[in-house]
Amino acid sequence: MNKDFTPVSLDGRRDFYALWQRTPRRSLDYTLPNLWGWQDYYGLEWCFDDQLCWIRQTRPHRVCWAPVGDWNAVDWQSILPLAFSQDEHHFARVPEELLRIWEQALPGQIQPQEDRGQWEYLYRQEDLAELPGNRFHKKRNHLNSFIKAYGEPDYRALDDAMIEDVLAVQDDWCQWHECEGSRSLQAENEAINRVLSHWNCFSGLSGGSLYVDKRMVAFSVGEKLDELSLGVHYEKGLNGFKGVYQTINCLFARRAGQGVAYINRAQDLDEEGLRQAKMTYQPTDFLRKYKVRVRKG
């Protein structure tokens, strides 16, 4: 693209947040904690103009992500073909809403490809918070097992004074799962440490934790995406505590998710085990994303 890109940094957060608030469909991918946390792993870069924040991934290959800003206020027919010099250009992680805008603005020049592994799972807040009916009886059983073993859950909202405990849980989790032997788990660990060590630099982060005998055994970190949805960035629980994941999931949705309609629990990246786990919570919808090829007219 014919633009001056620089690495995603916290120095640009004010400009980013101004455009983020105007973005019609806010994907968990495009939050500042996600972009900055994974900046090194994906080699993420950005550049700003008056209307948009353009985002580019450089590792393991170069591809643009969808731009952030008010998509409905942009003259895409004029801007998009001029934004790159090649006869065609590729975008990844494009939300369906932006794809439809592009198709209408540039008929015959947009070639989409469904990217199921990048679809973000949307759940009804009340489903995760209350686990109602027969659909969730297994989840309730795990929650009840935790309560039977450890008593009424000691849930605490996170603040920056608790970050040291959170990172201790993350370190224990990583040792158990041998993060050093997995490039992706190591990258996730670095992203979590990076973001949580700068907790106060981000707008809208929230978190919850579980304690057993004054020891933190699980945490969840999320971010309000818009008036209707809360996104979950990270969720970790220590091995050996039966029902710990079902409990932190339920209580975080109940407490941090109070007042929103949907909980966004990110994508499955085409990992079959992760997909099965996410489907057991009965998603109500998906934030669909596509790979898109844009051809010059």
Image: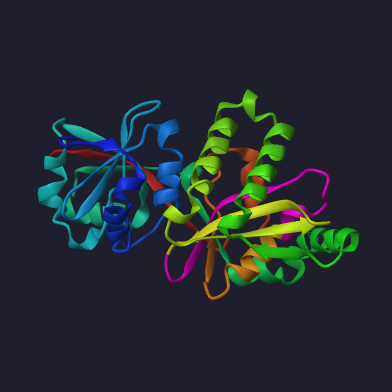
Residue 239 vs residue 270: left or right?
right
Q: Name, please, the residue furthest toward the top.
A: 181
State which quadrant residue 271 falls in.
Answer: top right
Q: Is residue 140 visible?
A: yes
Q: Residue furthest right?
A: 148
Residue at image coords 25%, 60%: 70
Give the answer, above or below, for where 26 lies relative to 90: below
Q: Nearer the viewer, residue 13 or 232?
A: 13
Q: Magenta span covers which residues?
A: 226-247
| Quarter containing the N terminus | top left
Q: Which one is in front, 198 or 154?
A: 198
Q: Position of residue 24 (x, y in %)?
A: 32, 63
Residue 297 in view here: no
Residue 54 x/y as whole percent: 25, 45
Q: Quadrant of the image for the C terminus?
A: top left
In the rendered structure, the answer to whether residue 233 lies left or right of residue 253 reads left
Is 218 on the left or on the right of 187, as rendered? right
For the point 21% across and 56% down, the residue is 104
Return the residue nearer the eye: 66 or 221: 221
Total tally of numbered discs in the picture: 0
Above or below residue 6? Residue 59 is above
Q: Residue at x 80, y 54 (%)?
A: 243
Can you name the residue that lies furthest to the front here? Answer: 161
Residue 267 is one of the magenta-drawn residues: no
Q: Above or below — where is 288 with respect to 224?
A: above
Q: How is the image coloured?
A: rainbow
User: Residue 277: x and y, percent?
Assistant: 67, 48
Residue at left 77%, top 68%? 134
Q: Does 217 appear above or below 18? A: above
